[in-house]
């Protein structure tokens, strides 16, 4: 009898705490990111796309290109380039991540969001100098 009551109390507590957490996240507005004007490329993750069009990113061999990713969406996103070993982990609303794209060889590399790979996917084009 007591065991059933304890299980019921624990279940109700988890339900109430979860509901309060969810309501708090809906009502609180996240702080705006400090990422404003940057040199390099700024990719804004919003509405399941990077910069609305998933643009190509151009860089030169042996010259690092600064890339900042800012999540302006209510959903989590990440930025992954497997061949260049770039992985931002998950970014929450207004969270940002800055990295550099660099390669010693020319080529085309794919970037994507692992949570929305069908709609958030683009190319990085590393070109020869000159």
Image (cartoon, rainbow, N blue to C red):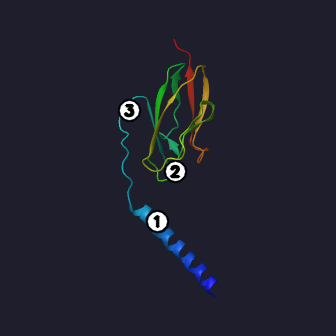
Residue 10: % across, % down: 56, 76
| Pointer 1 or 3: first along the chain | 1
Residue at mark 2 to residue at mark 1: CA–CA distance: 17 Å
Please, which residue is most extreme toward the bottom here?
1
Q: Is residue 3 above or below residue 41?
A: below
- CB atoms of marks 1 and 3 within 8 Å: no
Residue 51 got which mark? none
| Pointer 3 or 2: first along the chain | 3
Residue 99: % across, % down: 49, 33
According to the picture, the residue beneath numbered tag 3 turns out to be 38
- CB atoms of marks 2 and 1 within 8 Å: no
Residue at mark 1 to residue at mark 3: CA–CA distance: 34 Å
Of residues 61 and 58, the one nearer the viewer is 61
Q: Which quadrant holds residue 122?
A: top right
Specify few, some or many for label 1: CA neighbours under 10 Å numbering under 14, 14-19, or 20 or more: few
Q: Which quadrant holds residue 121?
A: top right
- Residue at 53% across, 19% down: 62
According to the picture, the residue beneath numbered tag 2 turns out to be 76
Residue 18: % across, % down: 51, 68
According to the picture, the residue beneath numbered tag 1 turns out to be 21
């Amino acid at each position: 009898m007591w065991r059933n009551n304890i299980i019921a109390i624990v279940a109700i507590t988890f339900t109430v705490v979860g509901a309060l957490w969810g309501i708090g996240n809906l009502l609180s507005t996240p702080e705006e990111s400090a990422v404003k004007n940057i040199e390099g490329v700024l990719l804004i993750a919003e509405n399941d796309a990077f910069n609305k069009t998933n643009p190509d990113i151009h860089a030169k061999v042996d010259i690092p290109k600064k890339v900042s990713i800012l999540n302006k969406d209510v959903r989590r996103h990440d930025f992954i380039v497997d061949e260049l070993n770039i992985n931002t982990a998950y970014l929450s609303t207004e969270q940002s991540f800055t990295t550099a794209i660099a390669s010693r060889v020319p080529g085309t590399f794919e970037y994507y969001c692992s949570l929305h790979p069908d709609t958030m996917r683009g190319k990085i084009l590393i070109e020869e100098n000159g």
